[in-house]
Image (cartoon, rainbow, N blue to C red):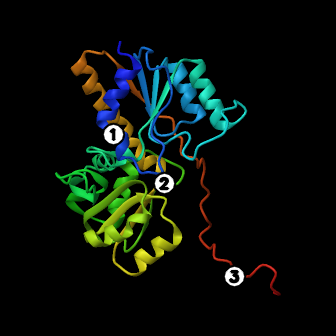
Amino acid sequence: MPALIDVLAALDTLWPPERAEQWDAVGTVCGDPQAQVGRVLFAVDPVQEVADEAIRLGADLLITHHPLYLRGTTTVAADTFKGRVVHTLIKHDIALHVAHTNADRADPGVSDALAGALDLRITGPLVPDPGDPAGRRGLGRICELEVPHTLAEFAQRAAERLPATAQGIRFAGDPEREVRTVAVCGGSGDSLFDEVRAAGVDAYLTADLRHHPASEASQHSPLGLVDAAHWATEWPWTEQAAAQLDEISDRHGWGLRTHVSRTVTDPWTGRTAHAVSSVPTHTPGAPH
């Protein structure tokens, strides 16, 4: 079995830490560099449920997309949520490694996996990485559908291909609008609306769309919006990343066993539908 330090060096070739955003916190959170690694678990979130899953699996290394400590900390006490995760992992000799915005910008990266889950043909990055002369790396992807869909059909396609969450899939725009070209961005993507409009695509699939940016985008253009749960848009990357590490393991003869967590760590756990007639006819506090 390889040492953790060797596996981490291989991961850095896939997702170089220097390509992460300056505000990001990527890399190794805990783990003995000389410890042997035989089993690896991939997940989106480094939460307690995933740490417990890693223990049950007998994993030596947990690789997540989201950082555990994004803004730093002054304590890893076990009576805090994040401290408990750290204590759990260290107690069971499980290393934790994070690939976040460096995995977003990679080729292939998070948005490649999202496009692949929907069987979209990628034509290029939405926001090209200026440091990539080949023009393949960057944030988001611009894609084409093999067969045109209506916006409603494309939203349904997303609902069928992405992992199920309480939120489901929301869309904004004319349901019958024809969709041939799509921009996708795994994770929160409403900061990229300028680039989406410049790309001239028919629809944009991402997560965490806020009221005002989405309203402005839909009111001032025919752009169709498809909003999925954050976790659901990034989960396909875990399967892609596991396959990449499998390839490296085979090449080096490491014999690593990789696994992908199917624990739903989206924070929303339920949803209640509105009644058909849900618009209030009386303002609370006003006289009848």
Using the image, determine if residue 113 lies above or below residue 141: above
Q: Earlier in the sequence, mark 3 or mark 1?
A: 1
Left or right of residue 68: residue 242: left
Q: Position of residue 150 (x, y in %)?
A: 30, 67
Tag 3's secondary structure?
A: loop
Frontmost residue, 206 versus 66: 66
Q: Quadrant of residue 277?
A: bottom right
Q: Which mark is residue 168?
A: 2
Is disc 2 surrounded by few (<14), some (14 to 19) or many (20+) residues within 10 Å?
some
3D distance between C-alphas at marks 1 and 2: 33 Å
Task: Classify mark 2: helix, strand or loop.
Answer: loop
- Residue carrying label 1: 16
The local crowd at label 1, few if under 14, some if 14 to 19, many if 20 or more residues have their Cα within 10 Å, is some
| Quarter location, residue 276 | bottom right
Residue 103 appears anywhere in the view: no
Residue 57 in the figure: left or right of residue 159: right
Q: Nearer the viewer, residue 249 or 220?
A: 249
| Amino acid found under the numbered disc labelled 2 | Gly
The residue at 31%/28% (across/down) is: 10
Residue identifier under label 3: 281
Q: Earlier in the sequence, mark 1 or mark 2?
A: 1
Q: In the rendered structure, which amino acid carries the disc numbered 1?
A: Pro
Q: Residues within 10 Å of mark 3 (few under 14, many from 20)?
A: few
Query: Residue 35: horizontal and vertical position, in percent?
Result: 45, 15
The one nearer the camera, 180 or 253, is 253
Up/down of 155 relative to 86, above or below: below
Considering the image in quadrants, where does the C terminus appear?
Answer: bottom right
Residue beneath the point at 28% across and 32% down: 244
Q: Position of residue 249 (x, y in %)?
A: 28, 21
Instruction: Spot the residue most to the left.
Output: 134
Q: Residue at x 61, y 65 (%)?
A: 274
Distance of mark 3 from mark 2, alpha carbons?
29 Å
